[in-house]
């Protein structure tokens, strides 16, 4: 029973990991750029939801659409002014620039909003606990999971079944091939960043139902998303989603027996996978 | 205009292109008339691919002009040029390997929004390449080299281009398959399609096209009807090696 409860809780958290990871893999798959600041955007998304509550009295769920739009806009600006100048440059310069973004965002948050952690007390979702057999599904976690999965499905549907989604995938597969089809490759790059960071906005809002936010709050999510992307096969949306769910469960299970080692276990898993099968375990697209 | 009458569908004038200082094209003039099949031949590194890429907008020329059907396209991006009616089958095919054959084909009609038009054109390419029908759901990357090249050709046709540019279709394709591909290509040509063809297999190119340009280190050194070029003993020895 305990194990089931733990696995279910892990799965619920995993939904959010999946959402964050899909945003990362989208950017990675389409632009071949690793966004090391991805977790920091999750942190910004959490602050957006926090301030929507503290300044406007909005529940995190009500703030969710705004959070998606604001982080989507951040994605546009980031691509346009930070990433585009290093497109086609060395991998090192791309790593340095997104790592710089990470420091900028975390440092900025610390200066603007202090290192104190803040939370939203009593969100609407906390009244939605579900009892199922002997298992409790915490309302905030459940809402986070359902929200994350819904948005993931919408995104997957968009990518797989629309004309623009196909163009996006084509751009990820072969930029020159895509250009020759008359696809506006620049616009696809922008779209990948807008969608990828909108994911972090939504994740941020969903997380504020459960977590408190401080300037370092995104670090774990960024790390886990990176691991999920590596496990799922770089650039694979489906793979990152499944890996995100798995990681949530693994972390939760390990934490049950050795509470300090949940995250360490994921990093260990990551190393094993990278050594044994660098294309990811799932390796699907 | 060297011996070419009538309004050109494609007119390249004094075109210069370089890659970070390395000259790829050094003042090229070239015309393709409507309905014509023109071959572009020359040694490795002569600039053939660069010329096709410049016409498609993949590289921005440093000087000169490219006029397609009355539009100056020399400084436009590909997504502005392709919808005007130009298709390029690039060197190395550039398929989308993890996408299905069907999706690859439909992406060829990306700039044509009409669904009905796409379906209609799918039937046209099925007629040319019947094997495609059975392969629609297969990932493009799992096809053989020859099949992939035919998908690339079919994909280019899906956009209903008025100018079809082909870059070394025969590269990495078995000789048997090449001759079958050129049979299909002849049908496309005879239906009135305007074709600009780059091809290493010179005999094949010269038989297929009615005119040819011989490119050498970024310049046109000779041009004329393929019959004339093949008839001249000097030309054959110096440039064609046939
Ligand atoms: N992306 C590039 N960067 C730098 N130089 C390039 C690039 N592409 C081509 N070149 C150079 O430009 C010149 C023309 O190349 P291009 O590919 O157009 O020749 P080609 O006639 O198509 O040759 P091939 O028969 O080998 O395909 C060559 O000297 C080549 O080395
Ligand atoms: Mg070439």
Image: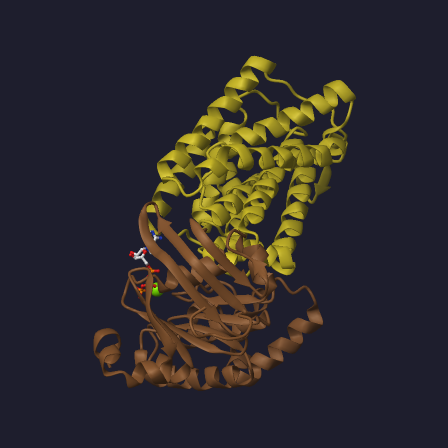
The hue used for chain A is: yellow
Q: Is residue B137 visible?
A: no
Residue B55 placed where, x, y %? 48, 60
Number of numbered discs overlaid on the protein picture? 0
The residue closer to the viewer here, B192 or B62, is B62
Q: Is residue A258 left or right of residue A2?
A: left
Residue B68, quarter of the rendered image: bottom right
Residue B92 placed where, x, y %? 38, 65
Residue A200, quarter of the rendered image: top right
Q: Is residue A220 visible?
A: yes
Q: Is residue A24 above or below residue B108?
A: above
Name the quadrant where ligand 2 sits: bottom left
Q: How is the image coloured?
A: by chain
Q: Quadrant of the C terminus of chain B?
A: bottom left
The residue closer to the viewer here, A109 or A139, is A109
Chain shown in brown: B
Q: Residue at x 49, y 65 (%)?
A: B11
The residue closer to the viewer here, B119 or B164, is B164
Q: Quadrant of the N terminus of chain B?
A: bottom left
Residue B13 placed where, x, y %? 45, 60
Residue A205 placed where, x, y %? 67, 32
Q: Residue at x 48, y 46 (%)?
A: A31
Q: Is residue B202 left or right of residue A253?
A: left
Q: Residue at x 65, y 54 (%)?
A: A158
């Amino acid at each position: 029973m305990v194990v089931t409860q733990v696995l279910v809780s892990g799965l619920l958290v995993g939904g959010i990991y999946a959402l964050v990871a899909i945003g990362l893999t989208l950017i990675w798959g389409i632009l071949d750029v690793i966004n090391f600041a991805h977790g920091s955007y999750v942190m910004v998304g959490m602050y957006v939801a926090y301030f929507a509550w503290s300044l406007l009295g909005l529940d995190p769920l009500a703030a969710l659409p705004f959070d998606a739009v604001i982080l989507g806009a951040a994605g546009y600006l980031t691509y346009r002014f930070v990433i585009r100048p290093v497109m086609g440059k060395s991998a090192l310069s791309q790593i340095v620039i997104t790592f710089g973004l990470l420091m900028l965002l975390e440092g900025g948050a610390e200066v603007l909003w202090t290192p104190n952690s803040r939370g939203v007390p009593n969100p609407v979702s906390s009244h939605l606990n579900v009892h199922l057999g002997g298992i409790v599904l915490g309302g905030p976690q459940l809402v986070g999971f359902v929200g994350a999965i819904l948005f993931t499905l919408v995104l997957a549907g968009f990518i797989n079944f629309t004309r623009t989604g196909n163009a996006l995938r084509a751009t990820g597969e072969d930029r020159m091939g895509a250009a020759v089809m008359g696809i506006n490759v620049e616009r696809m790059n922008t779209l990948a960043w807008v969608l990828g960071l909108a994911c972090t906005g939504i994740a941020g809002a969903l997380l504020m139902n459960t977590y408190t936010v401080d300037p370092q709050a995104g670090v774990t999510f960024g790390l886990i998303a990176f691991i999920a992307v590596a496990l799922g096969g770089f650039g694979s949306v489906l793979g990152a989603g499944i890996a995100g769910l798995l990681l949530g469960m693994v972390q939760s299970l390990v934490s049950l027996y050795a509470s300090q080692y949940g995250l360490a276990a994921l990093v260990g898993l990551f190393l094993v996978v990278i050594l044994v099968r660098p294309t990811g375990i799932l390796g699907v697209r | 205009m060297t011996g070419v009458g009538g309004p050109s569908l494609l007119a390249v004038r004094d075109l210069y292109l370089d890659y970070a200082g390395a000259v790829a094209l050094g003042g090229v003039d070239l015309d393709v008339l409507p309905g014509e099949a023109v071959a572009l031949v020359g040694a490795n590194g002569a600039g053939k691919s660069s010329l096709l890429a410049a016409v498609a907008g993949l590289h921005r020329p440093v000087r000169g002009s490219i006029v397609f059907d009355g539009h100056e396209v020399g400084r436009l991006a590909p997504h502005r040029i392709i919808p005007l009616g130009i298709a390029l089958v690039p060197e190395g095919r550039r398929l989308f390997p993890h996408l299905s054959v069907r999706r690859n084909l439909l992406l060829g009609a990306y700039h044509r929004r009409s669904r009905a038009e796409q379906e209609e054109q799918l039937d046209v390419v099925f007629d040319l390449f019947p094997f495609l029908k059975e392969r629609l759901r297969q990932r493009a990357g799992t096809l053989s080299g020859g099949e992939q090249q035919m998908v690339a050709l079919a994909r280019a046709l899906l956009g209903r281009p008025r100018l079809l540019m082909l870059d070394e279709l025969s590269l990495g394709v078995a000789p048997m398959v090449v001759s079958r591909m050129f049979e299909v290509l002849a049908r496309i040509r005879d239906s009135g399609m305007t074709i600009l063809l780059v091809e290493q297999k010179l005999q094949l190119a010269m038989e297929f096209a009615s005119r040819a340009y011989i490119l050498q280190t970024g310049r046109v050194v000779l041009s004329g009807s393929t019959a004339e070029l093949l008839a001249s003993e000097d030309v054959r020895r110096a440039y064609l090696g046939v």
